[in-house]
């Protein structure tokens, strides 16, 4: 499954909110958590139908996109807009295959979103009011979901064209980020440290694993098939390679560990380290709620201490990758 982050993770550069949606009525999900839903699919359908009616060329289609829709899950930069054009052009011939779902709008998604947000809240246990705006948008068939915080508003964006099972897992992952932001332990800013990415992405992946126990654990973390097995083969090298950069918030370091290739030549090594760190904390008695409350300023040091302890420990017997604790070391 191809996208610019992960089937079940948000791209660390986040996405530009090129359209400003209007606030919709709120639904109370738990006593401390509320949700509102904004649906951008009608705007996309207006663009699509106009382009088909005009038999529009790619350039004219793009002008219609900017006029009638103008939303893309890309970095908020000029380069991001170029990326949006490329993705839109690539996706255009494939939109007919997902039009039926797009025309259904957000209504079928709403009860699922409420259910998944409630399940995540029961694990993280927010102790103050959190409101999340769920933005349902038409993407580029990349399954690219994201969560951002801006001027006090927390927005989680989910592509409507994703298959229902994938979309449900995407929501679970992103609602973990959104609640952690709302709880005040994570800013959700574009600029963050490598250590903060380790913790927040690891937490979201493990929450997803917890809430989908019947799915293979790789569904909660993998970007491409076989990636987790490859990472396991380079476990010690990955841990040692990321260690000096956990306090860094430099764009080059972020890109190296979130997109890659990292020191071992793999993509997304930061997500693998997060998977390991959170898995080990859970195995040693920390709860999801405990981990979600670690302040962002403490995240790099907490992750550093965990990796130090693992690297210093004697090598235990190998164990199954299905275990919650996956920290056996192989030199």
Image (cartoon, rainbow, N blue to C red):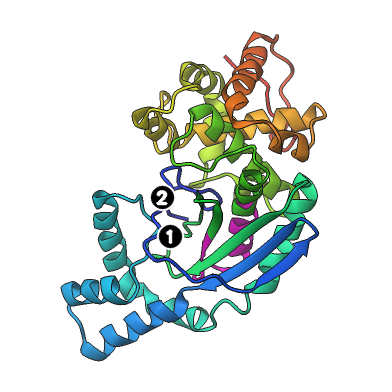
Q: Is residue 53 above or below residue 271?
A: below
Looking at the rendering, which quadrant does residue 119 occupy?
bottom right
- Tell whether 207 sits left or right of 64: right
Q: Quadrant of residue 282?
A: top right
Q: Is residue 20 magenta?
A: no
Density class for disc 2 (Cα within 10 Å; few <14, some 14-19, many ≥20) is some
Residue 288 at least partly seen = yes
What is the number of callouts on the image?
Answer: 2
Is there a contact, CB below 8 Å, between mark 2 and mark 1? yes
Instruction: Indicate whether 280 appears above or below 79.
Output: above
**Does the stretch in magenta take in 172?**
yes
Q: Residue at x 32, y 77 (%)?
A: 68
Q: Residue at x 63, y 74 (%)?
A: 25
Query: Which disc number belongs to residue 178?
Result: none
The residue depicted at 40 percent of the width and 38 percent of the height is 259
Magenta residues span 157-173
Residue 4 left/right relative to 292: left
| Percent position of residue 324, x then y | 75, 34
Evaluate whether residue 261 shows in this view. Answer: no
Question: Which label number is shown at residue 4?
Answer: 2
Disc 1 is placed on an element classified as loop
Q: Which mark is residue 142?
A: 1
Q: Residue furthest front?
A: 151
**Image quadrant for the C terminus?**
top right
Give the camera-side residue of 2 and 106: 106
Distance between the Cα atoms at labels 2 and 1? 8 Å
Q: Position of residue 284 (x, y in %)?
A: 80, 26
Locate residue 150, reporting x and y percent.
49, 51
Q: Which residue is outermost to the bottom?
A: 53
């Amino acid at each position: 499954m191809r996208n610019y982050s992960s089937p079940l993770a948000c791209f660390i550069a986040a996405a530009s909110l090129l359209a400003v949606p209007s606030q919709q009525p709120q639904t109370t999900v738990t006593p401390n958590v509320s949700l509102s839903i904004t649906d951008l699919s009608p705007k996309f359908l207006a663009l699509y139908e106009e382009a088909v009616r005009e038999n529009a060329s790619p350039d004219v289609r793009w002008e219609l996109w900017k006029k009638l829709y103008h939303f893309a899950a890309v970095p908020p930069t000029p380069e991001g807009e170029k990326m949006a054009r490329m993705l839109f052009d690539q996706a255009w011939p494939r939109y007919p295959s997902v039009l039926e779902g797009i025309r259904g709008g957000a209504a079928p998604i709403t009860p699922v979103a409420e259910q998944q947000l409630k399940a995540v809240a029961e694990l993280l246990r927010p102790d103050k009011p959190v409101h999340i705006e769920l933005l349902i948008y038409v993407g580029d068939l990349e399954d690219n979901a994201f969560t951002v915080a801006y001027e006090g508003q927390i927005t989680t964006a989910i592509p409507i064209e994703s298959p229902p099972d994938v979309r449900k897992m995407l929501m679970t992952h992103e609602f973990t980020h959104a609640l952690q932001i709302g709880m005040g332990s994570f800013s959700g800013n574009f600029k963050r440290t490598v250590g903060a990415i380790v913790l927040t992405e690891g937490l979201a992946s493990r929450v997803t694993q917890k809430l989908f126990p019947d799915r293979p654990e790789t569904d909660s973390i993998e970007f491409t098939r076989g990636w987790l097995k490859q990472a396991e083969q380079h476990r010690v090298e990955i841990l040692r390679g990321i260690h000096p950069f956990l306090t860094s918030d430099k764009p080059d370091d972020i890109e190296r560990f979130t997109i890659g290739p990292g020191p071992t030549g793999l993509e997304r090594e930061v997500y693998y380290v997060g998977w390991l760190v959170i898995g080990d904390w859970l195995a040693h008695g920390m709860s999801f709620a405990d981990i979600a409350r670690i302040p962002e300023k403490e995240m790099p040091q907490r992750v550093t201490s965990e990796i130090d302890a693992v690297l210093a420990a004697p090598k235990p017997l190998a164990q199954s990758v299905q275990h919650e604790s996956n920290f056996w070391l192989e030199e």
